[in-house]
Image (tube, rainbow, N blue to C red):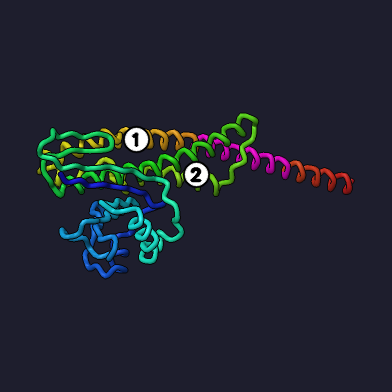
């Protein structure tokens, strides 16, 4: 029986694989959906003779295959010198673990933390890495969007007390963060996309579909989408109230200026008389 252990983490943002490839002396060009698969010790492209692999994804996911804890630490300490976007990321709180066992004598099974397959197929490794990398990346977005919800909750509390102190710059930053959640979950993490191998391999398709359901990828994406739309609606309300306050302020300024002009005119009439 062969066993494969997967450990996934999420970096703080996306990873430019083509720029990383240049730094590592790799001439290959990577498409958005393709992972870079490296030997965690040599940082060269992994081969079939390697027993430990590292999968790196554009959306900031990294999956270690059969790597020891020390090997993972050394890789994470070394990779920032090749990728500027990873500098300063000492802790990676978003993580996921999974196991694949190849055993011809056992029935195929796919569970939350382990899958059993009757025979080895490289596509199984790729799919498991893809799914758990998506999962940790979604966890990163979920935590960030909850932080924004807490911020908006504070604004709503202030609004209930008749206060709305939100500069236009902060309003723009808030809207940008919300749009970023929607764009990242769709474009970067490719939640709605399936690996190409699933179209030609029934076992791979079943593995991906089952694991995507177990990790609730689509449901979590829909929740992020719903929260993003709710936050955008709230932002529209805050923007409308802010514009109304600004318009009222301008109207009062105009009224005061007109009043001053009338007073000056009356003073001139009085002096002339």
Label 2: state its secondary structure: helix
Is residue 118 shown left or right of residue 128?
A: left
**For marks 2 and 1 on the same chain, the one whose residue lies earlier in the sequence:** 2
**Is 65 placed above or below 99 here?**
below
Q: Position of residue 254 (x, y in %)?
A: 68, 43
Label 1: state its secondary structure: helix
Alpha-carbon distance for marks 2 and 1?
A: 21 Å
Pointers 2 and 1 in contact (C-beta within 8 Å): no
The main secondary structure of the magenta stretch is helix
Q: Tell me which corner region of the image, top left, top right, bottom left or bottom right, holds residue 72.
A: bottom left
The residue positioned 29% from the left and 52% from the top of the image is: 64
Question: Of the numbered discs in the image, which one, if any, rests on residue 231?
Answer: none
Q: Position of residue 246 (x, y in %)?
A: 61, 41
Q: How many residues crowd around disc 1 within 10 Å: few (fewer than 14), some, or many (20 or more)?
A: some
Count of marks, rendered view: 2
**Is 49 placed above or below 260 here?**
below
Residue farthest along the top direction in this orientation: 160
The residue that label 2 is drawn on is 174
Region rendered in magenta: 236-257
- Image quadrant holding the C terminus, namely top right
The residue that label 1 is drawn on is 220
Q: Does the magenta stretch include residue 238?
A: yes
The residue positioned 70% from the left and 40% from the top of the image is: 255
Quick one: 176 or 66, which is closer to the camera?
66
């Amino acid at each position: 029986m062969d066993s494969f252990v997967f450990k996934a983490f999420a970096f703080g943002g996306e990873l430019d694989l083509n720029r990383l490839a240049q730094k590592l002396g790799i001439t290959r060009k990577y498409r958005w959906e393709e992972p870079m698969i490296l030997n965690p010790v040599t940082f060269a492209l992994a081969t079939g003779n390697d027993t430990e692999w590292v999968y790196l994804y554009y959306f900031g996911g990294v999956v270690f295959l059969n790597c020891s804890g020390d090997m993972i630490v050394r890789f994470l300490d070394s990779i920032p010198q090749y990728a500027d976007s990873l500098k300063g990321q000492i802790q990676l709180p978003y993580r996921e673990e999974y196991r694949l066992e190849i055993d011809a004598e056992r029935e195929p099974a796919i569970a939350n933390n382990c899958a059993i397959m009757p025979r080895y197929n490289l596509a199984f490794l790729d799919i498991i890495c893809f799914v758990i990398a998506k999962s940790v990346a979604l966890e990163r977005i979920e935590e960030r969007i909850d932080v924004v919800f807490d911020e908006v909750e504070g604004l709503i509390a202030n609004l209930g007390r008749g206060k709305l102190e939100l500069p236009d710059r902060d309003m723009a930053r808030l809207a940008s963060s919300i749009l970023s959640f929607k764009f990242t979950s769709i474009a970067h993490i490719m939640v709605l996309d399936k690996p190409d191998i699933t179209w030609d391999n029934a076992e791979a398709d079943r593995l991906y579909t089952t694991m995507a359901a177990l990790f609730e990828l689509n449901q979590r994406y829909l929740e992020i989408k719903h929260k993003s739309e709710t936050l955008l609606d709230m932002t529209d309300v805050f923007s409308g109230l802010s514009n109304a306050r600004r318009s009222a302020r301008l109207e009062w300024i105009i009224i005061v200026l007109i009043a001053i002009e009338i007073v000056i005119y009356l003073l001139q009439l009085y002096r002339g008389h």
